[in-house]
Image (cartoon, rainbow, N blue to C red):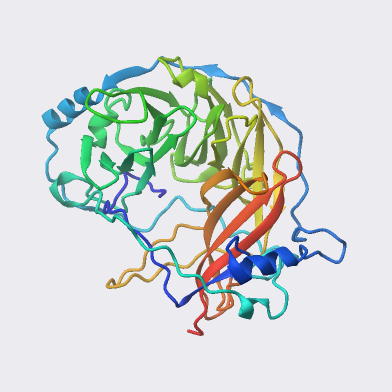
C-alpha cells in the first residue's frame, strides 16, 4: 500500500471466498467441458491476422540502456535470538491505532482511454454462446486458517497494514507495518516475532519504516524481506536475507541498505514509494514511484540488485535505472520486479500499467541482470479496456476501502508443465460494467479483478489470454 507516512493498518491476513454472485469471465486452464472447448478453438484473430488486441500500444520504444553497477556497503549479520532480545528490551507495548486518510501518492493524472482497445471482458474474445456453455467450477475449500497479526498488544496498530507474506517449505513469514512473524503451517508462532523497528534496527538509521515485501526464493532456499524508510527525501531501501529456509532462534539475517540516490543518479530530492519487489535466479528487482519532497510525482525508477552480492556478507551491488516513464510521457507506472524461479533464466523484467494510457501494460526487459545489466526501452502491450477502480464497499462498515489505483499486484513467471511454455502472470483492480468489461465512466460500474497471461517474453511480448472476475448482477 502506498502512503505518505508510515503504514497504517489492521494487520490481519484474510482469505477471500468467491461466491456464486461472482462470475469468472475469461479462458481458464480447467478440466472437463471448458478445457475441451478451449483446445478445440483456434485463437481469435483480428481482421489483420494478428492474435493480440489492437490498441495503440504494441511497439517497442527506444534501445537498450546499459547500466552502471554501484558497489554499496557490506551487510550486517544478526541472529534471530539477538533480534528478539532487542525487541524484548525495546518493549514497545501497546500503541494507539493510527488511521490514514485518503492516499496521496497516486497516479499524477487520470490516463487517457485508448480508443482502439477492445471492449471485451476476456482475450481471446469468447465465441458467441460459449460463456453459457462453460462449466461452473467451485472454488477450493479453505484449509488451515488463522489470524496472523492484530492491532492489539502493540503488534500492528496501523491502518492499512500493508499485509505481506510468503510460504516456504515448512514456514510462513508475515511482514506488515509494525510486525514481522514466522509461523509453521499449523499457525504456531516460531522463533521470530518482532516489531519491525527492532528487526530492521541495524540498517534503518533511526528512521520509520513502510511498504514491506517478502519473498521465499526456492532457488537459494533463502527468505528475502524488503522495506523502505520514509524521511522526506532520499529514503533508504532495506533488504534482509535469511541464512536458510527455516527460521529459528539460531538462524540469522544479513541486512543491507542503500539510498535511492546511490551513485548520485539524481534522486536525492525524491522519495521512493510503493516498491515493487521481484526475485529471480540472477538478481533482485525493485521498482519505485518517485515523488518530490512536496509529494509531486516525478517519474518511476528501477533498481537491479546483483543477487550474488547479497547471498554472503556483501558488499551489495545495485544498478539504478532512473526515469522509466519519461516524466509522465510513457512507461510503467508503479513498476514491479517480476518473480521467476526458473534456474536457467537469463533475463529479468519490470512491468506496470502505462503512465499515460489505459489499456496498456509496459514491460522493461533486463539483460545480463547478474553482471552489468542493460534495460530495454518500453515494450508496450495492448490489453482489453482498463480503468481506475472505485472505492470498495466493505461489509459492516460505513467507510469504503481504498482500492489504490490500477497498479499491478504480484507479477510472476511460470513454466507450464504440460506445454513447457514460459509465461508471465499478473493482475490488478479495475472498474467494470455488469458484463465485466473495463469502463472508465458510466452508471452501474463495480470493481473487478483483471488477470493476464503474457508470452513471448524474450521477443515481442504478446497477450496469450486474459480474463475478468466480477459480479454480474444488474445492480
Tell me residue 97's x, y (percent).
20, 52
Quarter residue 29 falls in = bottom right
- In this view, the residue in front, 300 or 157, is 157
Snapshot quadrant of residue 245 = top left
Classify 15 as above or below 339.
below
Q: Is residue 254 above or below residue 347?
A: above
Residue under the image location 20 percent in, 45 percent down: 155
Left or right of 216 in this view: 318: right
Q: Where, by quadrant of the figure, is residue 123 drawn?
A: bottom right
Q: Which percent across, then down, holds residue 231? A: 36, 34
In percent of width and height, residue 9 lies at 28, 52
Along the line of sight, the residue nearer the viewer: 325 or 246: 246
Residue 117 in sight in this render: no
> Is 365 above or below relative to 110?
above
Nearest the camera: 44 or 196?
A: 44
Say which residue appears at 63% left-offset and 20% top-offset: 372
In this view, the residue farthest toward the right is 48
Tell me if I can see residue 462 in this picture: yes
Amino acid at each position: 500500500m502506498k502512503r505518505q507516512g508510515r503504514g497504517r493498518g489492521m494487520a490481519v491476513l484474510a482469505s477471500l471466498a468467491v461466491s456464486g454472485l461472482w462470475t469468472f469471465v475469461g479462458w481458464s486452464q480447467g478440466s472437463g467441458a471448458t478445457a475441451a472447448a478451449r483446445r478445440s478453438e483456434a485463437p481469435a484473430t483480428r481482421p489483420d491476422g494478428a492474435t493480440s488486441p489492437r490498441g495503440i500500444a504494441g511497439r517497442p520504444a527506444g534501445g537498450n540502456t546499459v547500466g552502471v553497477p554501484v558497489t554499496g556497503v557490506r551487510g550486517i549479520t544478526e541472529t534471530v535470538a539477538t533480534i528478539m532480545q532487542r525487541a524484548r528490551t525495546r518493549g514497545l507495548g501497546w500503541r494507539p491505532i493510527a488511521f490514514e486518510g485518503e492516499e496521496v501518492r497516486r497516479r499524477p493524472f487520470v490516463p487517457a482511454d485508448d480508443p482502439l482497445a477492445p471492449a471485451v471482458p476476456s482475450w481471446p474474445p469468447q465465441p458467441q454462446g460459449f460463456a453459457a456453455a462453460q462449466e461452473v467450477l467451485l472454488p477450493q475449500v479453505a484449509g488451515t486458517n488463522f489470524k496472523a497479526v492484530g492491532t492489539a498488544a502493540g503488534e500492528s496498530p496501523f491502518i492499512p497494514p500493508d499485509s505481506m507474506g510468503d510460504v516456504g517449505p515448512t514456514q510462513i513469514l508475515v511482514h506488515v507495518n509494525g510486525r514481522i512473524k514466522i509461523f509453521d503451517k499449523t499457525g504456531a508462532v516460531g522463533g521470530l516475532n518482532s516489531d519491525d523497528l527492532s528487526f530492521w534496527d541495524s540498517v534503518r538509521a533511526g528512521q520509520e519504516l513502510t511498504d514491506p515485501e517478502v519473498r521465499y526464493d526456492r532457488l537459494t532456499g533463502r527468505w528475502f524481506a524488503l522495506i523502505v524508510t520514509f524521511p522526506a527525501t532520499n529514503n533508504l531501501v532495506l533488504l534482509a536475507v535469511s541464512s536458510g529456509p527455516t527460521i529459528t532462534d539460531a538462524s540469522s539475517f544479513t541486512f543491507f541498505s542503500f539510498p535511492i540516490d546511490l551513485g548520485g543518479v539524481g534522486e536525492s530530492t525524491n522519495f521512493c514509494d510503493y516498491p515493487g519487489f521481484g526475485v529471480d535466479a540472477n538478481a533482485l528487482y525493485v521498482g519505485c514511484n518517485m515523488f518530490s519532497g512536496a509529494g509531486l510525482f516525478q517519474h518511476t525508477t528501477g533498481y537491479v540488485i546483483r543477487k550474488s552480492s547479497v547471498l554472503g556478507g556483501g558488499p551489495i551491488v545495485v544498478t539504478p535505472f532512473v526515469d522509466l516513464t519519461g516524466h509522465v510521457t510513457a512507461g510503467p507506472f508503479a513498476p514491479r520486479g517480476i518473480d521467476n524461479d526458473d534456474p536457467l533464466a537469463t533475463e529479468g523484467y519490470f512491468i506496470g500499467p502505462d503512465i499515460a494510457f489505459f489499456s496498456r501494460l509496459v514491460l522493461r526487459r533486463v539483460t545480463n541482470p547478474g553482471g552489468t545489466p542493460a534495460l530495454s526501452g518500453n515494450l508496450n502491450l495492448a490489453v482489453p479496456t482498463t480503468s481506475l477502480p472505485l472505492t470498495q464497499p466493505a461489509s459492516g462498515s460505513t467507510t469504503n476501502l481504498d482500492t489504490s489505483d490500477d497498479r499491478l499486484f504480484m507479477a510472476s513467471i511460470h513454466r507450464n508443465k504440460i506445454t513447457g511454455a514460459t509465461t508471465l502472470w499478473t493482475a490488478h483492480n479495475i472498474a467494470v460494467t455488469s458484463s465485466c468489461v473495463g469502463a472508465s465512466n458510466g452508471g452501474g460500474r463495480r470493481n473487478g479483478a483483471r488477470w493476464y497471461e503474457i508470452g513471448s517474453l524474450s521477443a515481442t511480448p504478446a497477450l496469450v489470454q486474459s480474463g475478468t472476475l466480477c459480479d454480474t448482477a444488474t445492480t
